[in-house]
Amino acid sequence: MARDYGGSEFNTEGQIRTAAEMCRLRQEFFYLAFAAFLREAEFVHVMPERDYRSARETVRRYRDSADGTPWEPLATDSGAFAAAGQDNGHSV
């Protein structure tokens, strides 16, 4: 995200959607990308059927289990959305 859109704390829905598609994230997990990179008010607008805090906790739990690093928000080069064992050339 930082490489393609600059180093801001949060990103837009379009930026996140594009990055998720480039990383081939399955659509059923887009809500996790939105939770990681959108403010709560924007998340609720984009994903009204999902709970922001629960989604962020899910991302945090899986992120922490990967390398033990605390989360808030995801590091710009975390690789959290890349397929395991694959390097598709796109960093989030």
Image (tube, grey):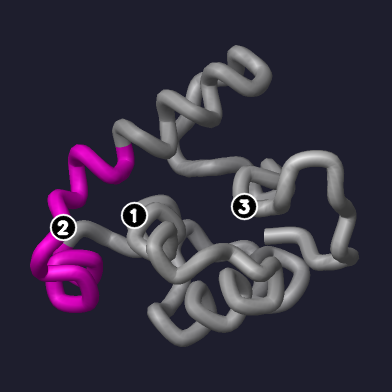
Q: Is residue 18 left or right of residue 86?
A: left
Residue position for label 3: 81
Mark 1, mark 3: which one is toward the viewer? Answer: 3
Q: CA distance from mark 1 to mark 3?
A: 12 Å
Q: Residue at x 45, y 70 (%)?
A: 27
Residue position for label 1: 35
Q: Nearer the viewer, residue 77 or 85?
A: 85
- Mark 3: few/some/many CA within 10 Å (<14, 14-19, 20+): many
Q: Nearer the viewer, residue 70 or 7?
A: 70
User: Is 60 placed above or below 67 here?
Assistant: below
Q: CA distance from mark 2 to mark 1?
A: 10 Å
Residue 76 included in the magenta stretch of the image: no
Q: Report the disc number at residue 50.
A: 2
Q: Amino acid at mark 2?
A: Arg
Residue 22: horizontal and vertical position, in percent?
A: 69, 76
Q: Secondary structure at mark 3?
A: loop
Residue 41: horizontal and vertical position, in percent?
A: 15, 66
Q: Residue at x 50, y 73 (%)?
A: 16
Q: Quadrant of residue 80?
A: top right
Q: Which residues are magenta?
A: 41-56
